[in-house]
Amino acid sequence: MIDRYLHQFSCWLLALERPTATRLTLAGTLLVALYSCTTITQHPPGTRENCLSLLCFLPEAVIFNPRLFVALKLVFFASAVLWFLQRILPWSSTIAALSFTVLVSLSHDTNYYTPHLYHFENLYLLICATWQLLYRAPIAESLRCGRFWNTPLVPNWVNFLFLYYISLAYSFSGASKIFYSGLGWANGLSLQLWVKFLAESRLDNPIVQLLVSERVIAFAAQLTTLIAEAFCWLALFSLRLRVLLGVLLLGFHLTSEFVFGLGFYGNILGIFSVMIVQPLLTSTRFAKPFAARSTSRAFAKAGQRSN
Amino acid sequence: MKRSTLELTFCCFFMTLFALLPPLVIDLYPFSTYPMFSQAPTSLYRYTVADPLGQPLNPWQFSLHPLYIANPNPKIGIRFSTTLNPVATPADRDAVTIEAKRVLDEELPYMEYVTITPNELHSDNAGRSVVSSEHPSWKICSPRFPRCSAAQPAEGSITGEIGE
């Protein structure tokens, strides 16, 4: 029984889609990453208490080296532009994804606290770079023949892994809130305090004023966020819930940007694309990876590809 | 190795890694449980520091700057500065006094005393909004001025709600 489901799931992961949605998401992610590249900073040396990235084992001369930091930015900038234009693939994609990962990791290891701003865009770049590396031959051929947009080139795992990451990330976030503060996290008061404490310069705005002056509205906003985050893992199993959770999380992020101006553009793009647009545009196979009725089509496509 | 095998291996690796590692490491880029804003505070504190003429001084100099990340167990990387203001709870008055005396002695030797005023942001009585209240000021004398009396109430200290 389990073997059968695993086999069906594997076939579904390997089934191919046309690259339109993935390519557009990738283009948006590259633009967000390029913007991040201009804003990401390196801080001066100080007393280290903890590792904040996997690269913290590197010597301080490397982590705090300003020339290396600028060089990484330039390498990423050049390779990302080439990747955006689909030139020198898969080298441009691999170098862009790796240089961005190293750049963000080094920035984290000079930081006081993890900013959590770059995870989503970085992960999507890494997933897409892996896809372009593994599919370099068919991608090159389709580009050469001018059939890139009409050829099924993107395996379902590309967007599924990103959806998987988004679902787990928000579920962990919701679980952290419940773990540290219980269900009482959503009490309205804490959000009002954060708004008044951290968004002082925006208190003149009517929406911000409404949040600060009406506990009920702040409570509703927090409760919606907690529900959407804690149950985000359900997005993996249901198309309707995925879109609904995507809309709620998008609302949460857009409101947060409006009030606090935090800069979670990678998250916004990822949620909008993978949880809202792609399920509505692509076939039910992507929407329901575990549904039995999709299996026959997935088998057929996987068979075609292996031939 | 066949491409499909590589693809499925990558998927298994990715899914296992991002399901198991974040709860273990909390924040180790690119793994994270996104624990920011997980602490729901009931009040937040700021501190203002003033010289004997009532002119404001930089709270940073007295380690009273707010360094707030709304996370009860933050994983700190590089500590640039220490602060005595935990923001979500009141600062330890004894620790603040010791630090203020040190600053007065070492960095502001000409100053007789400073007044530190805790400012608390909390819920209003109606439970509808948040208000800001100033607590009684703390007068902290410099060890260089033995005649200065800390018991003497600081001028201009106000107590009561001043928020909307």
Image: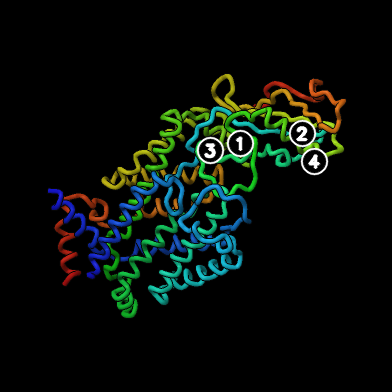
Mark 3, secondary structure of its residue: loop
Q: Earlier in the sequence, mark 2 or mark 3?
A: 3
Residue at image mark 2 = B101
Q: Amino acid at mark 1?
A: Phe
Residue A113: percent from the left, percent from the top? 54, 47
| Chain ID at mark 1 | A
Residue at image mark 1 = A197
The Cα atoms of the two marked residues, 4 and 2, are separated by 8 Å
Q: Quarter holding the N terminus of chain B? A: bottom left
Q: Is residue A1 left or right of residue A259?
A: left
| Chain ID at mark 3 | B
Mark 2, secondary structure of its residue: helix
Do pointers 3 and 1 mark residues of a single chain? no
Q: Amino acid at mark 3?
A: Ala
Residue toward you, B162 or B80: B80
Q: Earlier in the sequence, mark 3 or mark 4?
A: 3
Do pointers 4 and 2 mark residues of a single chain? yes
| Chain ID at mark 2 | B
The Cα atoms of the two marked residues, 1 and 2, are separated by 28 Å
Residue toward you, A144 or A53: A53
Do pointers 2 and 3 mark residues of a single chain? yes
Residue at image mark 4 = B106
Do pointers 3 and 4 mark residues of a single chain? yes
Q: Quarter holding the C terminus of chain B? A: top right
Q: Amino acid at mark 4?
A: Glu
